[in-house]
Each structure stands twice: as C-alpha cells, then as structure tokens.
Amino acid sequence: MAESCKAWPRGQCTWGTRCKRVHHKNLDPAQYENREHQEYSVPNDVNVACPRCLAKMLPCDKKGRGGIDDPCSECRWFGGEDCNCVLSVGSSYNDVIWSVMETRERSGYDLPAVKGREAPYGKLGAKIPMPISQARLRPDWKGESREELLGKPDMLLDYVRTLPRAYLVPPGRTSKEARGDAYVPPPVGQERPELGLLQRKRKRAPGASSTPTVADVSSMSTTAGASTMPRTTRSGLNAAGIQSVQLSRDQDPRHGPAMRTTIDWDTGAVTHTYRNGAMATFPGPNGF
C-alpha cells in the first residue's frame, strides 16, 4: 500500500498527479473552502487550554488560573491525583486535532468517537477518572461542578469528527521555528549559553577544558607554521604536545546541523555550512 502524502493536506505537494504517494480525498485542502458549515472552524487560538483538555478535545477553563493547585474544571473532577494541570504554551485545539487526524488513515482520516468523561482509560481500561483531592487544591478554588461537566455536549459536532480536514487549517510554525526566524546572532564575546549558536552549554568531564568560543580559537597560536587546526588525538594532545582544540557541532534551529565548519585564523571568523546548503559566517574579534 502506497504511503500517504504528508504535503497534500497542507496544500504543499508540488508533484500533482505525478506524486507517487496517496492523495486521500478526505485530506484535500479544498475541503476547508468547500465545507458545508462555513460559519465554523476548529478553534486555533494558542495558550488557551491544558494538555489534557487538548488531547481529549474537551473545553478548558485553565486560562487565567494559577498554578497546579488551581486546575481547570475538567482536571479538577476527572484528572486524578497524578494530574498537574498547567496551560499548554504554543498549542491550539486545531494543531492537536490535526495531528490526531493524520494518524487515522485506516478510518479515512476521521476523528475517534467521543468518550464519556467517566469512561475508563489507560491500558486495558484499568484506570478510572477520579477527582483531584481537596488537599491538592487551593482553598478558594472555583469552577464548574462535576454535574455541570457531565451534562455538557461534545465540544466537536458530528460533522467535524466525520470530516475534520474541512474544519482545520494546517498547523502554524512551531515555537522553535519561530525563534529561529527571529534569531539574530549576538556580538562575539556576548553570547549567552541558552541563545548563542557558537557558545553552547558544555558537559564538563573531570580535568577537561571547556569548548572554546570564537574568541578563544582566534587567540590560539599555530605551531610550526601550520595554517590549519592541529590534529587531535584520543589523549587530547596534538603531535606537538599542545592541548588540542575541541569545537561542539553547531545546530541551527532553521538549517539543522552544520556539516562543515571552517575558521579563518587571521580574523577568528567561523563559517558553518549546513546540510541544506545554507552558510552562516560569524565574525571574530578582528572582524571579517
């Protein structure tokens, strides 16, 4: 059986009728524009629900609440003692439901039938939904009652579960990709371990030196007229008995891992060439 085309439902397949992967009709991007109920689409706002409510496709009132001692109403009554209700950052109902839809190839890319809030779950249905104990709640917790929740209809109407692609839009860029788009390399010497591409957090072994930054590399002198980086050995010393240079492999949030890194020993500039062919050069202390 041919594999389903991942680009097709997003409207990004450039092969058209020549594509060797399956273009399932229920994933046709035109389904959204031609949907029967034009007034409705799955909510796509981010930072509005907890992970449990997103996964179970339940309405959530976590937004505006406090920490784990102030859970949403759904988690309060059905989350159980192990539940730590927090707001899911960067996720929307649209994005989560899209990911569920993509796994439903055998049933024509629909959504699973709704389950009751009191339905058993887990392996072999061994777990029963239970409330969070009063001891774990803030004294002034307020929310919907258990009976109110049990009386609510399904958040998703039947036509959405039958043909979800008609009411979903392709997920946006992830928060990691967005950070990569907005990233501007800091000046040399001002890199922060959690942000810089050249200066990474290092695991330090006993007696091992830290991975040098560009400034460190440019300050190192070459020996015997050598114009390239000294060859390293298992002992960490080069043939001349000088401590070898060890650089961590660069990982760019947009371009992936660096496949080749070169250093200009006169200026200290470092150039990374990535798997997709992109190049990025970072100046040394002496400029380019």
Image (tube, rainbow, N blue to C red):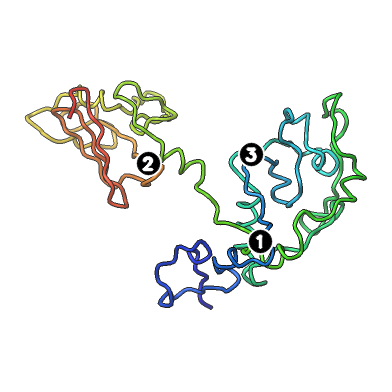
Q: Are marks 3 and 1 in contact (CB under 8 Å)?
A: no
Q: Amino acid at mark 1?
A: Gln
Q: Position of residue 190 (x, y in %)?
A: 34, 21
View extreme (front): residue: 39
Mark 2, residues whose alpha carbon is within 10 Å: few (<14), some, or many (≥20)?
A: some
Q: Amino acid at mark 3?
A: Asn
16 with respect to 60 (left or right):
left
- Kindly report the distance in space between the C-alpha atoms of the residues bearing marks 2 and 3: 26 Å
Is disc 3 placed on a helix, strand or loop? Answer: loop
Residue at 57% over, 56% down: 169
Q: Position of residue 221 (x, y in %)?
A: 15, 24
- Kindly report the distance in space between the C-alpha atoms of the residues bearing marks 1 and 2: 41 Å
Q: Quadrant of residue 88?
A: top right
Is disc 1 placed on a helix, strand or loop? Answer: loop
Q: Amino acid at mark 2?
A: Asp
- Residue denoted by label 1: 38
Residue at 51% over, 61% down: 10
Q: Earlier in the sequence, mark 1 or mark 2?
A: 1
136 with respect to 177 (left or right):
right
Residue at 86% over, 44% down: 130
- Residue denoted by label 2: 252
76 with respect to 52 (left or right):
right
Q: Earlier in the sequence, mark 2 or mark 3?
A: 3
- Residue denoted by label 3: 47
Residue at 89% over, 49% down: 150
